[in-house]
Amino acid sequence: MRIFTTSLAVALLMSATAALAAKDTIVIGMQDEPPVLDPTQNAAAAIDVIFSVNVYESLVRIGEDGTVKPGLATSWTIGEDGKAYTFKLPKGVVFDNGEKLTSENVKWSFERAGSATSTNPTKRHFANIAAIETPDPETVILRLKAPSSLFLSYMASGGAAIFDPKSADNNKTTPVGTGPYKFKQWVKGDRVVLEKSPTYRDPSKAQIKQATFKFVPDAAAQVPALLAGDIDAFPTVGATETLDRFKADSRFQVVIGSTEGEVPLILNNNKKPFDDIRVRRAANHAIERKSIIDGATSGYGLPIGSHFPPHHPWYVDLTNRYPHDIAKAKELLKEAGYPNGVDVTIKPPPFAYARRSAEIVSAQLMEAGFRVKIEPVEWAQWLDVVYKQKNYDMTVVAHVSPWDQDNYTRGKDYYYGYQNPEMDALMKAVLAESNEAKQKDLYGQIQRKIADEAVHAFMFQLPRTGVYAAKLRGIWKNSPVSVTDLAGLSWVD
């Protein structure tokens, strides 16, 4: 009896101790699953959300405040001519596979990214590098062909991640990096699991020992998963109409912030009927933003009239450039040779904001004379058919990369199908400009040019509609880049 009592006391004590211990795992919900696990091979933002800064590291990173901060490099200097960037690397850094990091890894990764055979979605960002020097294992010097005001921001992207040559070819399915976390498991269609890396250079940095990214594409299914405690955090809840319910529940915290995600009705400028600016302008006059925002994001989105985030001080409000005017839209269609209307198709991916926007926009377009068919596609199909093959008339998707106005200089090979030498000249000028006042003016001209050309019909800036367990700390309110900073997360008792 005495032995039993002692054992019971020990068991109760152990149970109490375990109950008092801070939680060290987390399950994070995501709407979309990455098609591959390597950001240098695919443009899907979901790859960066899981792996950038956690597993893969770039020389620098973007902080929660949107500024450039040290990443893999501990410091850097910029030459007086603005064309020489010298980065210092820490000593003793190893990849998950045990290989040591040196400046040669940076040289190899960047030469690979900018090579003629590269499929890196940010390949254009490396075209300005004239030479890469590695004077010692902890120093790398990047010499540019011309100064670039956005070069450091480019070097913070997932496409600029530093790889080990021995593992790079397998990173699509088995990621290897230098970050505070390492890849553990990918169950396709369900989850990706990361665990704290035992070889990371600063073991005390991360408190979360294991993170599971759970894929829940159905917006309706996200709610019961959160309520049941199966998911601890959902940074972008699709069913925004349920947020008030979570606000009233003490088990949760609802955090509303901004993102870099401009959401346009994307028009294929290289295909009829949207190769005609009059038809594109007709579509712009047909849309009514408030109804779209109310229906797609429950009013949380901010209206936009061009490709630039409203939270930025250089934003120009162009939402009145094309006032909602059905009569004007019909007149423009008639001028373009479509007096009896025109058949068009929208191919929205499976995200709640995209599908909901497509439904509302289609009704608005039909009032103006467009005969609209909606063809929903899954994410992998969207990346193939719409993004790669450019086989579409219209689509809806958020462009979440910061400073991505250079998409309008990618020519007809890019899925916008848009090309204009004047836009190319403006982007070239702003990249070469170091004076902030002049940069602001040039970005204003870029915003106006995109709107005047009616490249797309701009609708809203995607909000960050996050629902999190009440005891979770370290959450980013805003999303200046598509990352999840696991090392900054922790639980309170």
Image: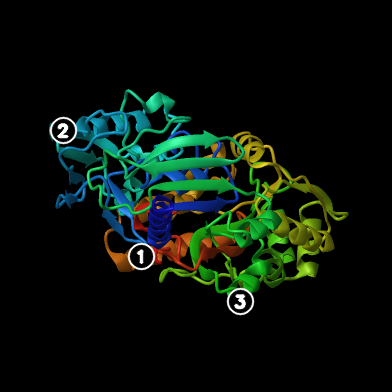
Residue at image position (68%, 72%) is: 290
Q: Amino acid at mark 2?
A: Thr
Crowding near pointer 1: few (<14 within 10 Å), some, many (20+)?
A: few
Crowding near pointer 3: few (<14 within 10 Å), some, many (20+)?
A: few
Of badges 2 and 3, the one in the foreground is: 3
Q: Amino acid at mark 3?
A: Ala
In the image shown, does 409 or 479 lie closer to the viewer?
A: 479
Residue 248 disc label:
3
Q: Amino acid at mark 1?
A: Asp
Disc 1 designates what residue? Answer: 65
Farthest residue toward the front?
Answer: 1
Q: CA distance from mark 2 to mark 3?
A: 56 Å
Q: Are marks 2 and 1 in contact (CB under 8 Å)?
A: no
With 222 as the anchor, is 186 left or right in this view?
left
Secondary element under disc 1, as helix, strand or loop, is: loop
In the image shown, does 118 or 367 lie closer to the viewer?
A: 118
Disc 2 designates what residue? Answer: 134
Mark earlier in primary sequence (2, 1): 1
Mark earlier in primary sequence (1, 3): 1
With 405 as the anchor, is 430 left or right in this view?
left
**Residue 278 visible here:** no
The C terminus sits in image quarter = bottom left
Secondary element under disc 2, as helix, strand or loop, is: strand
**Residue 206 visible here:** yes
Percent across and percent down for residue 283 are 72, 59
Q: CA distance from mark 2 to mark 1?
A: 31 Å
Using the image, determine if residue 372 lies above or below residue 186.
below
